[in-house]
Image (cartoon, helix red, strand yellow):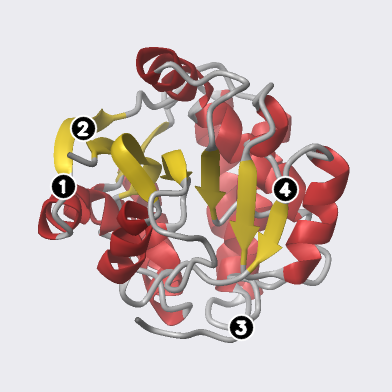
Amino acid sequence: MTALTPTPLPNKERGFQWHQRYQQQANWTRELREYIFNEIGLTEESRALEVGCGTGAILSTIDSPVYGLDIQLASLKEAQIHAPTSPLTCANAFSLPYADASFEIVFCHFLLLWLPNPQDAIKEMLRVTRAGGYIIAFAEPDYTHRVDKPAALAELGAWQRDALKRQGANPAMGADLAELFYGAGIEIVETGAISNAEHEPFNTEEWALEWATLEADLAGNISDERILKMKSLDKLAWENGERILYVPTHYIRGARG
């Protein structure tokens, strides 16, 4: 197994509201999580674990006290506030500090794209899952098939892909999910892509948060002038009802036989 020491959060941490960003991402998958948790019968008695729980944005939406694990101690301290009943552990995904078959449900959310050897983490998730239990990746994007319209905004997708690569992420992770789960020896039950909000009305708050993330990613690599120009074009396209933004975001549910 690969051992990791705590590393900086992806992106520029200073001045960035991570919990707000994680809440935004959690909202994107809310209906999917409700559907899958209902399908597999998550109850207050279920033993479940979120790997890479961050600040507790997902944990705080679940009534039962789900276990949470993250490599960032600062994130876990905030998670204690948002999910006070969840048992939290600071450790890495490649060496989960739990015995074999400890949980009925083990899941992650926008995590695997950041890991250098995601299949090793998936195998660890499988190891701590009981026979008949489930391993779930709720959201992994595929930025290599990102769609930006109007055409003048296409460069924005390339900027983001390059920024993710610089941070050590895999922009195509979503497309690799099924192969990774299958290679880990997991029985695939269901896979698909979550719906995208590219045709929803312009939301100033959502747009501002998305751009805060993007600007932090691009800082130091794209000039402020070019970023500001692209930001203005993007806002105008949204306001005129011309904007299409689609990032295929894949999910997968597997079972341990």
Looking at the image, which is closer to me, 28 or 187?
187
Circle 1: residue type: Ala
Which label number is shown at residue 220? 3
Label 2, secondary structure: give it. strand
| Residue on which the image places disc 4 | 87
**Pair 3/1: label in front:** 1
Using residue 36 as the reference point, say whether residue 86 is left or right of it: right
**Marks 3 and 1 close (CB-CB < 8 Å):** no
Q: In the displayed structure, would residue 210 be above or below residue 195?
A: below
At 71% from the left and 44% from the top, the residue drawn is 56
Which quadrant, please, contains the C terminus?
top left
**Mark 1 and mark 2: Cα distance apart in space:** 7 Å
Q: Earlier in the sequence, mark 4 or mark 3?
A: 4
**Mark 4 and mark 3: Cα distance apart in space:** 38 Å
Q: Earlier in the sequence, mark 1 or mark 2?
A: 1
Q: Earlier in the sequence, mark 2 or mark 4?
A: 4
| Residue on which the image places disc 2 | 191
> Which quarter of the figure has residue 147?
top left
> Which quarter of the figure has residue 84?
top right
**Mark 3 and mark 2: Cα distance apart in space:** 37 Å
**Pair 4/3: label in front:** 4
Label 3, secondary structure: give it. loop
**Mark 2 and mark 4: Cα distance apart in space:** 29 Å
Circle 4: residue type: Pro
Q: Earlier in the sequence, mark 3 or mark 1?
A: 1
